[in-house]
Amino acid sequence: MLRHITATRYVTPLREGGSMPAIVEGDDFGLYVLKFRGAGQGTRALVAELIAGRIAQALQLPVPELVFVDLDPELARTEPDSEIQHLIRESAGLNVALDYLPGAANFDPVAGLPDADLASRIVWFDSFVSNVDRTARNPNLMVWHRALWMIDHGAALYFHHGWDTQTPDAASAFPMVREHVLLPAASRIMEADADLAPMLDRPLFERVLGEVPDAWLGDTPVATRERYVDYLTTRLERRAAFVEEARRAHG
């Protein structure tokens, strides 16, 4: 289960992201990158962050620790920026955050790509969770202590933004893989598939969805949770399309 902390201090905004995440201090004296439930993408971005992050951890991919964060709206009183005040007040209650990596640098593909194994595993993972936000323009990768770290999965599982009007095709390919920043190095997609797919199954997805708070899942949390589990299970079982798409995109 995720650790649960309370934010004690708003440190600074991170204006690179459209959702205006921020560095906050927790009651454990650690620093975290907080994703606000009151941001424009709403709780579905937090759901995507949590589900994708936990799946990445299960696949032993490099992601910072995820934690639940209680946010007191009183923290807004000391902030001079009215936009930040509003965001804090709208995000009162439970949010999600990632461990802050002090001194980490933005990944620059010009400086060099990771080895084929890691690149292929990350491309496979992003194809599985339909993460559209790992491009050359916005890699959402950090280099910390000379190692690559994956951050910001709020744009994954984008299909759930249209659930109210259409049923997603879990067996679909992932055409956006062609824009993936690590695709040029991902020459071992089939090997990544053979290694990673057996590490996932329906019980794992059920455990991951069991961690998602009811309040983030709308009026029917039990049914919505089951819908995510069904989608992920089917996507795993019928992954051939997105695996082949990634293999062909690499060339």
Image (cartoon, rainbow, N blue to C red):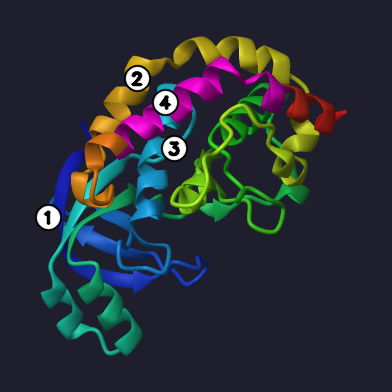
Nearest to viewer (mark 4 / mark 1): 4
Nearest to viewer (mark 4 / mark 2): 4
Residue under circle 2?
A: 204
Residue under circle 1?
A: 27
- Which span of residues is magenta-colored? 224-243
Marks 1 and 3, how far apart in space? Answer: 26 Å
Q: Secondary structure at mark 1?
A: loop
Marks 4 and 1, how far apart in space? Answer: 37 Å
Marks 4 and 2, how far apart in space? Answer: 12 Å
> Would residue 172 appear left or right of 209 to someone viewing this image?
right
Nearest to viewer (mark 3 / mark 4): 4
Q: Residue at x 44, y 66 (%)?
A: 19
Residue under circle 4?
A: 230
Query: In the image, what residue type sits under mark 4?
Result: Asp
Earlier along the polypeptide chain: callout 3 or callout 2?
A: 3
Marks 1 and 2, how far apart in space? Answer: 30 Å
> Would residue 3 appear left or right of 118 to someone viewing this image?
left
Nearest to viewer (mark 1 / mark 2): 2
> How many marks on residues?
4
Residue 14 in the image: state x and y as whole percent: 43, 68
- Relative to 63, say whether 139 is above or below: below
* Observer-nearest of 211 and 196: 211
- Relative to 9, say whether 78 is above or below: below
Earlier along the polypeptide chain: callout 3 or callout 4?
A: 3
Marks 3 and 4, how far apart in space? Answer: 15 Å
